[in-house]
Amino acid sequence: MSDSSFVRTQMLPPEVPPLTERGLVRWMRENLFSSVLNTVLTLAGLAFVIYAVAATLPWFLNGVWNAKDIKECREIVLANAGPEATGACWALIRERWHQFLFGFYPADLYWRPVLALGLLLVSLAPLLYYSMRRANLILVGTVSVLTLIALALLAPGAALLVLFAGLFAALTAVAWYAPQKLVWLTLAFPLLAFALLWGGSVWGPIGVAAGFGILALVYSLTKSFLGVVVATGAGVVAAAVWWLMVQTSVTTALHGAIPLGIQAVNSDQFGGFLLAFVIGVTAIGASLPIGILLALGRRSDMMLIKTLCVGFIEFVRGVPLITVLFVATLLLGYFLPPQSNFDLILRVIILVTFFSAAYLAEVIRGGLAALPKGQYEAADALGLDYWQAQRLIIMPQALKVSIPGIVSSFIGLFKDTTLVAFVGLMDPLKGVTTIVRADVAWKGIYWEPYIFVGAIFFAVCFGMSRYSMYLERKLKTDHR
Amino acid sequence: MTLATDAPKDVFRLSMLIYDTRYRSYTIQIAVLVLLLLFLGWITDNTIQNLAERGKDISFNFLWQRAGYDIDQQLIPYTNDSTHGRATVIGILNTLVVAIIGCLLATVIGVVAGVLRLSKNWLVARIMTVYVEVFRNIPVVLWIIVASVFLTETQPQPRDFKVTDEMIMAGEEPKASMLFGAIAITGRSTDIPAPVLSRPLPTLEIATVPVSLSFLAFLAVVVVSVMANRRFLTRVTAVQEETGVRPVTWWKSLLILFGPSIALLIAMGLHLEYPELKGFNFKGGISINHAFSALLVALSLYTGAFIAENVRAGIMAISRGQSEAAFALGLRPGRAMKLVILPQALRVIIPPLISQYLNLTKNTSLGIAVGYLDLRGTLGGITMNQTGREMECMVLMMGIYLVISLIVSSIMNAYNNAVKLRER
């Protein structure tokens, strides 16, 4: 036995992997050049990217922000970047941004739509993040600061500015101490926004709100002896009587006595993204409940209800939105009593709402169909009635399943607001851009307005789809 | 002590109409029916009053009157002396032509983009993600307008293609030249070579629609070749099952499929007629107007992005175990895709694909943005403005769109049922 044997008592330190198996080289081998086909694809992709960047980047970089017309723009580009160079003329956006955003809304009243947008985002907070304090606070705080900055830039006057600063400070405080309480703002928002955007006497919106008050009052007074169903009916009838017959004379009288109000703005002055948001947000808010009702109606046991819902949904889904918009402008006049004529924006909103509701109904029906039968049976076994079962058991699950579909319907609806240009409204894409491009000073400008409008649409729609992914992850309760 | 409750007395009380589930559904339905009838009556009454006030009646006679306007893209003969009815038919055909070609293109784009987005190639996957997100999140009207502006405002005018003697002497190039020497994209239209027969068969006229016998003959030959090829393949399979060896088929198959039709085309003298600059415009060949091209390109790219998402979701829905099992059985990747993965993925992909096709078909009405004369442009546009019959035109137009949608969805649903998984 020789004792020259050597036993290693310690492990050797591991060798560094070879150069081709680590770092960037490895990543490129695996992700870009793993096979012949992949190499070809990578090279083709690279060529495409280089070509696209080479074609567009100089144009973006040579962009001119400060010029009074397109000729001056081109001269500046030539002077800065030499002959043959092309450059964007962002001066157009700088000069006309207000038309893209507000249409022909009076310039000294821009603070009203901006304030409405700020309030919209604040009132969305409790819907988006329920009672999550941190998220609510971050959202409301950011929105408040941004809105106040925007308002300060628009300079509506020092007194108003202090008032709004106080308002948003209060809202931020509410978002921190009792986020759920913001729901009251959400409920009041439609009337608030209407009052802000259209202006006029404050008594109109108050009258409409009073109708809801009457509904609630009659319901709570009669519920004890008439029961839920009849009491609701009585409340609705009372409110309808108020709205249709009493309200106008009362509000007119009140306005005569105490003329409170702000400057009225006509509907035909609305345009640009203001119009897109008014139509989009109203239709989104109103179409969800109608869509849910239609989906439930389609699954109802009652023959007549089911037939009506199926007929409505299939009809609406079978025709293009543009024909529905034409109905709003051309045919609605025939269907309503002679001499009755109401606002084009309102008519468009109503028809767009019903259009979108039919699509939502199909999405929600998918969610309802995905629920196992046991859920319905369990609800019955607990002794819940139809609406209780829907509210507590069925809808929370069905809506959760259909979130991606619902949000993509909303995105589609928002994008479709551009179609109102074809019935004579001034949407940001076709309506405003056509006006801007028809201006002699900017004749020959192609891409800039479309890029500007497209970028805003992209930001809003992309944001919505990201939020839906977040919500899906957050609400996921199954363990897969 | 006995615990017994009184059996409910079988006496009908009025409140049972609302609170008794046996009667409640009838109460609700009757109430809805009454409200519905009242509503319809109200609308009808209003309509009659309004029509009387404007001195109008409901009549579809205008469909047989002279239209008096031109349509620059016509698949069947049409002049401005034709009737409004014929203009409507032209409109329907124009709608369908965009819809069908658009669906095909969008499917190709969507499948390629969807598959590439799942590719392991980092760069290509990113490029496809950007494509899908950009096109999905921006209104289709913008794409249509941008495509149209690109074609009509940034492309050269026909005169820029002109080559004069002085230019040849000076060795100058013209400002613009044709793609591959055959395709001219000008600010007015896209001109492509037209396939022309020098010895065509006669043309029949059936119900004022000309039917080319040459085309029918070609179609018949193609159908017969496809059927012959199918019989040939069945026989080959039989031989394979008997002997275990599959005979070489590919060149025979190719010969059966394409031989006869190529022979027929040569016999009829097929050649291409190239567009040529004559005077101020290109003559000869096929002139495709820009409204059509812009609509087609924009709709295909836009819908393609949505289809790409459906395809990606469909492929991701197939669990890894399926492809691993297929490889474990010794199937080659191509056959594993064809026999195992695709049939399952298709089931997930097809229902959303149907609704994308429907969306594309309905979106063809956005040709209004570029003045494309489809159904909306003829019946719901010029005809409606000329005759002033909004009610009739709108009803007819919505009815036709509805019928097209229902036909598309029923065809696709039939196909969907054919490939559906049959469980228990």
Image (spheres, coloured by chain):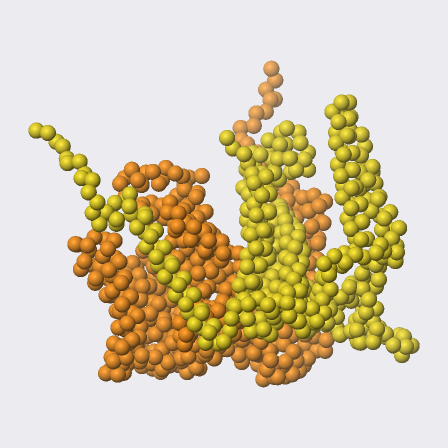
What residue is at 26 percent from the left and 49 percent from the top? B17
Pick whichever, A175 or B309, lies toward us.
Answer: B309
The location of residue A236, given as percent across then percent down, is 27, 61
Badge count = 0
Instruction: Tell me where residue A120 sits by quadrant.
Output: bottom left
Chain in orange (letter): A
What residue is at 87 percent from the left and 53 percent from the top? B268
Q: Is residue A385 left or right of residue B156?
A: left
Pick whichever, B89 or B208, lies toward us.
Answer: B208
The location of residue A391, given as percent across then percent down, is 32, 49
Chain in yellow (letter): B
The location of residue B134, given as percent across then percent down, is 57, 60
What residue is at 36 percent from the left and 82 percent from the top? A263
For the N terminus of chain A, give its image quadrant: top right
- Relative to A451, say whether A76 is above or below: below
- Work out whether residue A275 can be spotted: no
- Work out whether residue A236 can be spotted: yes
For the C terminus of chain A, give its image quadrant: top left
